[in-house]
Amino acid sequence: MSPSLEFWFEFASTYSYPAAMRVEAVAQRAGVSVVWRPFLLGPIFAEQGWNDSPFNLYPAKGRYMWRDLERICAAQGIAFRRPSAFPRSGLRAARIACHHADAPWVPDFVRAVYRANFAEDRDVADPVVLRDLLASIGEDRSRLEAASAPEAKGALRTQTERAAALGIFGAPTIAIGEELFWGNDRVEQAVEWCARAELP
């Protein structure tokens, strides 16, 4: 069995976008598998006294982030268009991904949602958009029903609570046991750590 890492992400998180687009490829090259862990930053931010994204609460930080994200996406060769609304709710998408956590199509769905939000400026909170994204990866549009299922709601709530218990305070975060690596710029370091941790 190959070593694995947990990739904790929030669909509204800007830096989770470039990380989500490459983490699986980086991990595969190192013989590491990825466990996708959607969660919600809102409750975690609330515990820190924030009622909005820190990039909105602190305008200078927000201006820097948008320019930084442009540079990162350009260097990574992925499309980027600043969303006309930020942050957009990823609640429904997160419930779908959480409910179908073991399904092989989940990574493609995650990337499709990120592209829709941060490259195409589509409202990923809209059920119509989510149905289209499911269809675009060859999945039944009825998967959207999971977003309303009590089991999905409970699973996402539990997963968000676990994120907080792990000490996760932002996204993306990669967890390898108790080791946390926060930020898009820690993807490679986390993968290397994971691969080396499994060496005899």
Image (cartoon, rainbow, N blue to C red):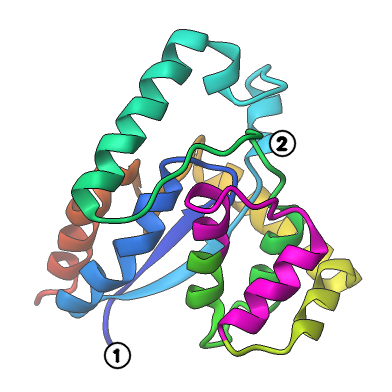
Snapshot quadrant of residue 113: bottom right
Residue at image coords 62%, 40%:
41
Snapshot quadrant of residue 37: bottom right
Visible residue check, residue 3 = yes
Q: In the figure, is residue 91 to the left or right of 197?
A: right
User: From what the image shows, is residue 192 above or below residue 88?
Assistant: below
Q: Amino acid at mark 2?
A: Pro
The answer to whether residue 119 is magenta is yes
Residue at image coords 71%, 26%:
46
Q: Nearer the viewer, residue 164 or 128?
A: 128
Q: Which mark is residue 1?
A: 1
Q: What segment is highlighted magenta in the picture? A: 113-137
The answer to whether residue 54 is magenta is no
Front tag of 1 and 2: 2
Q: Nearer the viewer, residue 29 or 114?
A: 114
Q: Main secondary structure of the magenta part?
A: helix
Q: Which mark is residue 43?
A: 2
Q: Which mark is residue 13?
A: none
